[in-house]
Amino acid sequence: MILLCKKRWTSLRLASLVVSAAALNGQAPETVDTSKLSPQVGTVVPAFSGVDQFGKTQSLESLAGPKGLMLVFNRSADWWPYCRTQLVELPSRYDDIKRQGLGLVSITYDASETLKKFADSRGIAFPLVSDPGSAIIKRYGLFNNTVDPKTRAYGIPHPGTFIVDRSGRVVSRFFEDAYQERYTAAKVLATLGAAPTGAPVSSTTSHVAVTAAISDVGTAPGHRLTVSVQATPRPKMHLYAPGKHDYQIVQLTIDRHPCAVEVHSDREEP
């Protein structure tokens, strides 16, 4: 672990761990630049209406909680394993999402009957909205036009998650260039300030006390997790560095797993 600091230390999320689907299946992940996919942070998302697995017509207004909505676009709940895994993970954090004042919805191009069958088999209670003609997906600028129209995958979106406020304005967005990789709900919540679910581990020296925790206690191939670190100087300890006196913790070094875990820098501050 390598730390540079300022006099007053804070809790920072410094690194993401990705359980690499590519490493496990021996294939290089197909990637696309998702940074320019609409909508962007600060913009208002388009209104939509769609039927969920319960046969209820849903909209932004009906789905939003007191503080907004976690809006998840998935490829398919029928045949795509990484989306199915993500959809199964979301219910485990549904109560935490609601405690953040957010509603939750997933949108796919699957028929509502397909979504009902999947939800019933997995005990999913939050709304899964059907977009069989990909009208919502297109309105959001997420339509994957690289897919052959002759295949069953035609109509899928680039998968990702938006956090929008009550007015429909994007507060944050979570997309991966490799569609096999997904932010877990716990990682998204940690970015919003929620406590990690993993039990914290601590280490203390004569100079500093460090506590770290991971966002998820369980994972699956393609999941992106967060490591949160809080560092506190010991009494009467002050650290200096060259240059300006606005020192920040700038780096966390984690030993790489030889096979299935990739490490990425986040430097996200609450």
Image: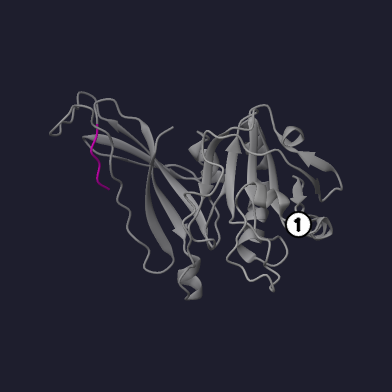
- Rendering quarter of residue 9: top left
Q: Position of residue 215 (x, y in %)?
A: 50, 45
83 w.r.t. 149: above or below: above
Residue at image point 53% right, 43% down: 173
Residue at image point 78% right, 57% down: 115
Q: Quadrant of the C terminus?
A: top left
Looking at the magenta stretch, what is its main secondary structure? Answer: loop
- Rendering quarter of residue 202: top left
Q: Position of residue 35 (x, y in %)?
A: 47, 49
Left-right relation of 57 to 178: right
Q: Where is residue 104 in the image (x, y as percent from the top left)?
A: 68, 41
- Range of the magenta residues? 1-5
Magenta stretch containing residue 4, yes or no?
yes
Q: Where is residue 257 in the image (x, y as percent from the top left)?
A: 38, 63
Helix, strand or loop for disc 1 = loop
Name the residue tied to disc 1. 133
Q: Which colour scheme is used?
A: one colour
